[in-house]
Amino acid sequence: MIMIKAVIRPEKVGIVLSELCDAGFPAVTKIGVVGRGKQRGVKVGDVYYDEIPKEMLMLVVSDNDKDDVIKIIIRSSKTGEKGAFGDGKIFVSDVDEVYTISSGNSGL
């Protein structure tokens, strides 16, 4: 099992969630986050913004679905054809175990 954490622009969340659901991946956790990337924020005139609002989407998928999910997120969250600074990042990590709290069952 794989955990995918995608930090994306807030205005792209609806599109990404819709695309994931249409592809058969409806189970997603969404968290509002703030931060900055390696560009260290944004300067607009004399004002410097170093805490830029983003949304983090977290989902756990089978190893076989990892590449498909990543392609969906990239395609649906990219700004324009080439993308732009601030479009976000995707983090991928292994998941050793999963438990459903209500039943105590393990696995997806």
Image (tube, grey):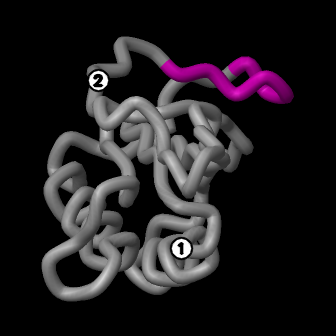
Between 4 and 45, which is closer to the camera in this rendering?
A: 45
Task: Please state if 57 lies on the left or on the right of 93 as rendered.
Answer: right
Sequence-first tag of 2 and 1: 1
Q: Is residue 103 magenta?
A: yes
88 shown above or below 34: below
Which residue reaches farthest top?
A: 96
Q: Is residue 50 magenta?
A: no
**Residue 28 x, y percent position in the rendering:** 60, 53
Q: Could you tell me which quadrant the N terminus lies in?
A: top left
Which residue reaches farthest right?
A: 102
Q: Which residue is mark 1?
A: 12
Mark 2 closeness class: few <14, some 14–19, many ≥20 residues within 10 Å: few
Q: Which residues are magenta?
A: 98-104
**Mark 2 element type:** strand
Q: Which mark is residue 52?
A: none
Mark 1 closeness class: few <14, some 14–19, many ≥20 residues within 10 Å: some
**Mark 1 element type:** helix
108 shown above or below 12: above
**Could you tell me which residue is drawn at 14 percent across and 77 percent down?**
82
Q: Are marks 2 and 1 in contact (CB under 8 Å)?
A: no
**Residue 62 x, y percent position in the rendering:** 29, 44
**Residue 97 x, y percent position in the rendering:** 45, 15
**Could you tell me which residue is drawn at 55 percent across and 55 percent down?**
44
Give the Cα separation between the discs numbered 2 and 1.
23 Å
Amino acid, disc 2: Ser
Amino acid, disc 1: Lys
- Viewer can see residue 2: no
Q: Which residue is mark 2?
A: 93
**Could you tell me which residue is drawn at 61 percent across and 43 percent down?**
52
Between 54 and 39, which is closer to the camera in this rendering?
A: 39
